[in-house]
Image: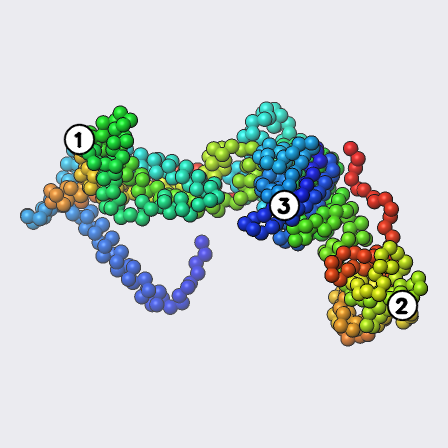
Amino acid sequence: MTDVTLQNVRKEFDGVVAVKNIDLQIPDGAFVTVVGPSGCGKSTTLRLIAGLEQATDGTIQMGNQDVTGVEPKDRDVAMVFQNYALYPHMTARRNITFGMKSAGDFSDEEIDRQVEEATAVLDIDDLLDRKPGELSGGERQRVALGRALVRDPEVFLMDEPLSNLDAKLRIKMRAELAKLHSEFGTTTIYVTHDQTEALTLGDRVVVMNDGRIQQVDSPQRLYDYPETRFVAEFIGDPAMNMLSVDISRDGTEYEAVGPTFRIPLPEGDGLETAAGAKALLGVRPESLSVADSADRSSFAAEVTVTEPLGDSLLLECRTGDQEFKLHAEPRTAVEPGDRVALTVETERLHLFDPQTGEAIYHAAAAESSERSGVPAG
Amino acid sequence: MSTREVYTDRLQAGVLLLPTMLVSLLFLYYPTVRAVGLSFYRASLARSDVFVGLENYRRLAGSGEYLRSVLISVLFATCVVVGVMAVALCVSFLIHEIEVGKGLYLVAVIWPYALPPAVAGLVFLFIAHPNIGIFTSYIEALGVDVNWFSNGPQAFVVVLIAAVWKQIGYNVIFMTAALGNIPDSLTETAELDGVSRTQRLLRVYVPIISPTLVFLVIMNTIYGFFGTFAMVDLMTKGGPAGATNILIYDLYRTAFQFYEFGFASAKSVVLFIAVGLLMYGQFRLSDRYAYYGG
């Protein structure tokens, strides 16, 4: 186990900048997920840590050692790939042991013992004599995990390891990965484009976009206090609604004013500077609800699409020329074309700068000390 | 196997197949049947054909010269297959690994294959000519007396090198294509695991591209027995003293220099059956050892 530190790391491919001078600290024993849309540089970042790509600039440290120019094999990392990367002509057992035997750092007894341990944990003892072609996707990924486990590396690197599995198996393997991590406690860096995986697995989640790190935080804080409009819209499904508003001030009372609505804003940092200017009001779909009767803080909207999800009714609505989504109670009697009155849970509002996209205000005051999901030691 | 009817109209399908079938019949199947038939006759240009039964085959079996030609052919073809594939595998691996100038190296390697065999033979004749060859003085500087016009083993080696040199390009095309199909993640896994380059080539790449290698073994065997005719003809004419007298050249001489068409036909039938059996054996072996997925 070790910690990993990236300092000012930059990677260019033929003039295209994939990773733009990022700084990242991954504590010893943490499970860090890196999430972002395709092409955001998350896989490149992982490959830089693995040594499969060389950084154009910046340094990568593991423990106290600078590993920036070090060969992949000397970094003591194990990687699990999206396509499993099993040698197709070798049995599962040989796939697991091939690397160890080739490297020559382990005695035969040691290898046998490690294989026994890892395969018992992963429940693949019976599959060891089969070739990858005779295994299902889930089994293959277990073998690939086994291969990574037996090497007992300092850092696990996982590049979308569950993306090729079907939905049900993915959820099962997700739970197993979490279990494995709590059992072995090896520092793990996990790249995914799936925000659910990122939030459920990571002690800390790194959100990347366009080669830059947008935010590094615990999953709940990422959801509650997005630092940028990108994070706000990327984390959460359906995405956070963004409404163009003007911030008006009346004494100590602030309001977000749109063409058809006035929403009161609870007092908080950032409002004073935002007052009188334009902003984007961020409202999560679950913070909006259909009101029984109109009152001062409610506003009217027209329903354009209804999507029954079972546990809720997703409504697409329009007010003025702005569109947004909300989760209504299931079995609410509304049809497209209906006009409804909506209320807002004002404690869950956010304001973003329309130009820079940075958060200027969160209605719920952030707790002063950040809860850290990273176990000590 | 799925049978899919592309043409619903059988007549249309037949008409489209006709040209190929005609050419095959005229230039492939008819000569084959004719050669087998001719092998039972004493046939030459001057006299009319006389049926002699198995006489030609009996003569072959008792000919020490022919037996020597068989041995030389087998040795030559084996050396060609092993030599070509060993060199081509190394070259393909290097080309596969290199990142800059890949296309340039590929073109350079494939170039000899693009030459007609006769031209390649001539080029090599001048490269390695005992008196005026471009490389000859360098090789002689190493203490070797280059005289392959009269030294049998040397002639064998020179023609072998020419044959290998000519065929490497063909092998490299297929091998680099096969190597290119191996997922990068396998290479990367091997790198992360600390698997050395040689191990990676021999333990990972070679098994995975084995179907391509089997195909190449067969193509190279055919080339070794039949495709090297022009080089032998241009460089050594089977000599000196029969040292490079491979079967295909031997039967050519029998037919077109000594005009013993019946005897030559018998030789070609034997060669056909021998190479056919060899192919069959190679296919059987490949089923056991080549990895075809699954």
Give how far across and how far down residue B193 sits, in percent: 57, 34
Looking at the rendered structure, the secondary structure element under dot 3 is strand
Q: Looking at the image, is mark 3 or mark 2 earlier in the sequence?
A: 3
| Mark 3 crowdedness (10 Å alpha carbons): few <14, some 14-19, many ≥20 | many
Looking at the rendered structure, the secondary structure element under dot 2 is loop
Name the mark on residue A38.
Answer: none
> Is residue B31 found left or right of A34 in the rendered image?
left
State which quarter of the image contains the N terminus of chain B.
bottom left
Between A355 and B213, which is closer to the camera in this rendering? A355
Q: CA distance from mark 2 to mark 1?
A: 108 Å
Give the label, 3 or 1, closer to the camera.
3
- Residue that appears at 44% across and 39% down: B94
Residue matched to label 3: A10
- Residue that appears at 82% across and 74% down: A339
Three-letter code, disc 3:
Arg
Q: Chain ID for label 2?
A: A
| Mark 1 crowdedness (10 Å alpha carbons): few <14, some 14-19, many ≥20 | some
Residue matched to label 2: A297
> How is the protein colored in the picture?
rainbow
